[in-house]
Amino acid sequence: MKSSSDLLPRARVCEAAHEQYILRFDDGSESSAVPSGVLRWDAELPAVGDWVRARRADADLALIESVEARRNSISRQRPGGGGEQVLAANVDLILIVMGLDGDYNLRRLERYLVLAASSNAEALAVLNKQDLCVDWPTRLGEVQGLTENVVALSAQESVEAIRPHAAGRTVVLLGSSGAGKSTITNALLGERRQATLPVREHDSRGRHTTTKRMLIELPGGGALIDTPGLRELALWAGQDSVDEVFAGIAELARQCRFRDCSHSGEPGCAVVEALEAGGLDEARWASYQKLRAEAKYHEREADQRAAAEEKRKWKVIHKAMRHHPKQRF
Ligand SMILES: Nc1nc2c(ncn2[C@@H]2O[C@H](COP(=O)(O)OP(=O)(O)O)[C@@H](O)[C@H]2O)c(=O)[nH]1
Ligand SMILES: [Mg+2]
Ligand SMILES: [Zn+2]
């Protein structure tokens, strides 16, 4: 359906914080922006990566009137449990950046892979700081056991392994603070746009040099979204996304004798057999169960939330009908 806002200039959200936005218009100009009153009423506020229509209020302020339907979005559970937080919208590729120093953690990588699976964006694991890890081939092999899409590199030397994946696409960089996201961003841009800071020696942890999510256009098409490290990454994903990432394990668990096997000692349990035979890694199995339980909890919560929202909508409609009995809805 065409609406009047379709006639307004189109722009992409480059930054979003506390209802303050930076937009980049199709003509290349940039402007600060705030949501219009109508949009605020709509509740679904834009996120970085969204395409919007905006009215220029004056030389350096625009009013966002509408948000285009998202192709996809990357979301987590808002820290503190307040529902969905969209980290980025309309994303083609997620670079999961992990340092080959103390940052290296397969369990965290699995969590990111589930996040990617639930967003329907492609994921590429980037093992960075190859120069700091003599044993990097072993780690590369470990990660290849989780996903086929992985590259190992030193962002300080070359990011050419990433370039063909990023060309012409919207790419979001996720990973711990200090993993090298801003270094990769700068290298892909060919300029030092994002500030970077050394990590602490003893635990490889970075400081939050990048303080907000920010979309930056790539020369030759495409865009990068650099992000601060996420301290918390509670899943906004269903159990099917977990099964997608752990395809082999999900398949194995379906081979137990009893369909509702809890894998805790029933006869004919394919999981216990595989654990005993050494074909299934204990840590990976534990990780699967943990993420599966978290996703199940999320599904239940999302259902309750949807039911509450439905109820609220009908309440508003009934109220309006009482006040305007002649009006049709
Ligand atoms: N040795 C080494 N250090 C790197 C590499 N890539 C990034 N760093 C350093 O790691 C630190 C954190 O990088 P930064 O890009 O700010 O990480 P971010 O927090 O993920 O954006 C900086 O001091 C970078 O210079 C690499 O490939 N090798
Ligand atoms: Mg950074
Ligand atoms: Zn079983």
Image: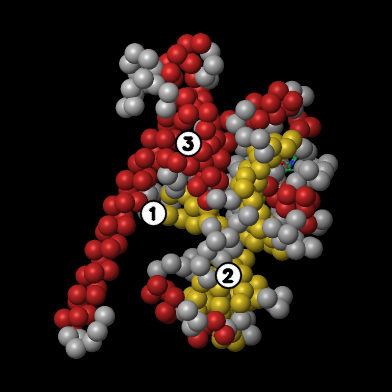
* Nearer mark to the viewer, of 1 and 2: 2
Contact, CB < 8 Å: mark 2 with mark 3?
no
Q: Position of residue 182 (x, y in %)?
A: 70, 50
Question: 37 or 205: which is nearer to us?
Answer: 37
Q: Is residue 272 left or right of residue 284?
A: left
> In the rendered structure, which disc, 1 or 2, sits on the residue that comes first in sequence?
2
- Real-space Cα distance between discs 2 and 3? 31 Å
Query: x, y percentage for residue 45?
Result: 46, 68
Q: Which residue shows up at 16% across the image and 81% down it?
A: 322
Q: Which residue is mark 2?
A: 51
Judged left or right of residue 22, residue 328 is left
Residue 147, given in percent of the width and then of the height, sits at 62, 34
Which amino acid, mark 2?
Trp
Q: Nearer the viewer, residue 226 or 242?
A: 242
Q: CA distance from mark 1 to mark 2?
A: 22 Å
Relative to 14, say whether 79 is above or below.
Answer: above
Q: Quadrant of ligand 1?
A: top right
Observer-nearest of 140 and 269:
269
List the residue tagged with mark 1: 83
Residue type at numbered disc 1: Gly
**Mark closest to the chain's N terminus, 2 or 3:** 2
Residue sitting at 39 percent across and 49 percent down? 80
147 above or below 227? above
The reply to whether dot 1 and dot 2 touch (C-beta < 8 Å) is no
Q: Amino acid at mark 3?
A: Asp
Q: Position of residue 296 (x, y in %)?
A: 36, 40
Q: Which element is circle 1 on? A: loop
Say what secondary structure mark 3 lies in.
helix
Query: Which residue position holds label 3?
Result: 243
